[in-house]
Image (cartoon, rainbow, N blue to C red):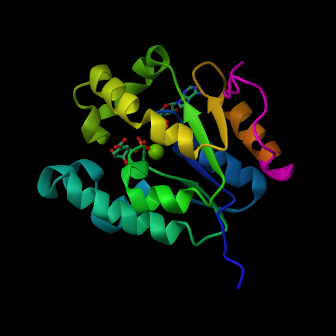
Amino acid sequence: MKQTLPRVVLIGAPASGKSKIAKMVAAELGCQRIDTDKVIVAEHGPIANIFDEHGEGAFRALERTAVIDALKHDAVLSLGGGAVIDADTQHDLSQAHCVLLTVSEEAVALRLVESPKRPLLRDGLAAWKALVLEREPIYRALADQTFDTSHRPLEDIASQICAWIRAGYPEESGTEGDNQQ
Ligand SMILES: Nc1ncnc2c1ncn2[C@@H]1O[C@H](COP(=O)(O)OP(=O)(O)O)[C@@H](O)[C@H]1O
Ligand SMILES: O=C(O)C1=C[C@@H](OP(=O)(O)O)[C@@H](O)[C@H](O)C1
Ligand SMILES: [Mg+2]
């Protein structure tokens, strides 16, 4: 039996635009969008409360369950920035079409106003930088395509991702690897 794969899985740093862009890509493709954080919040309440009351480990376990379920759907998926830490998730994602969204430190500084919702970013930009640096090799290893969201409208990036999907997921060309403009 042929395994169902998601149309695309968006990975990358917190506030790189995964959730917003996934919504736009799904709307353009006319398919379902699954945001694993939203699934967790709907079932278990706010992420910050899960961290505060049960710890990060409990959140990661819920996240892994949400990822396993999401990966079964023909949908556009946006994962939480830390979902890729899980070794089994890394293995699962190696079979999927993954798009990495990147963002510069300067651009993300303007976006972190929502940080209370992101418990790991309560210490601000320094915490964001440390997380991203640590995860960078995992993000890069899993990415089939990379788009930088620092200076471009979300809609443009969403359209480019749709074009890549419609073209049948061609391999990334060029030496830089980032679709920066
Ligand atoms: N290219 C962009 N231009 C302007 N704002 C952006 C861009 N990408 C993301 N944002 C803003 O950054 C915040 C985080 O976006 P979100 O989709 O929640 O990111 P993620 O899911 O990667 O954490 C949102 O307020 C969003 O509007
Ligand atoms: O990077 C992380 O570890 C996290 C990122 C968040 O998602 P976004 O990347 O969508 O902000 C959310 O899953 C949680 O706060 C933990
Ligand atoms: Mg998100």
Find the residue positioned furthest to the right: 167
The quadrant in which the C terminus is found is: top right
Q: Is residue 122 above or below residue 167?
A: above
Q: Is residue 175 above or below residue 50?
A: above
* Residue 179 visible in image: yes
Q: Position of residue 34 (x, y in %)?
A: 55, 60
Main secondary structure of the magenta stretch:
loop
Magenta stretch: residue 166 in it? yes
* Residue 12 visible in image: no
Q: Position of residue 173 (x, y in %)?
A: 79, 32
- Going 15% across and 49% down the picture, which residue do you hit? 52
Magenta stretch: residue 101 in it? no
Specify start and end residues of the magenta stretch as a single range: 165-181
The quadrant in which the N terminus is found is: bottom right
- Ligand 2 lies in quarter: top left
- Going 51% across and 33% down the picture, which residue do you hit? 16
Location of residue 149 by image quarter: top right
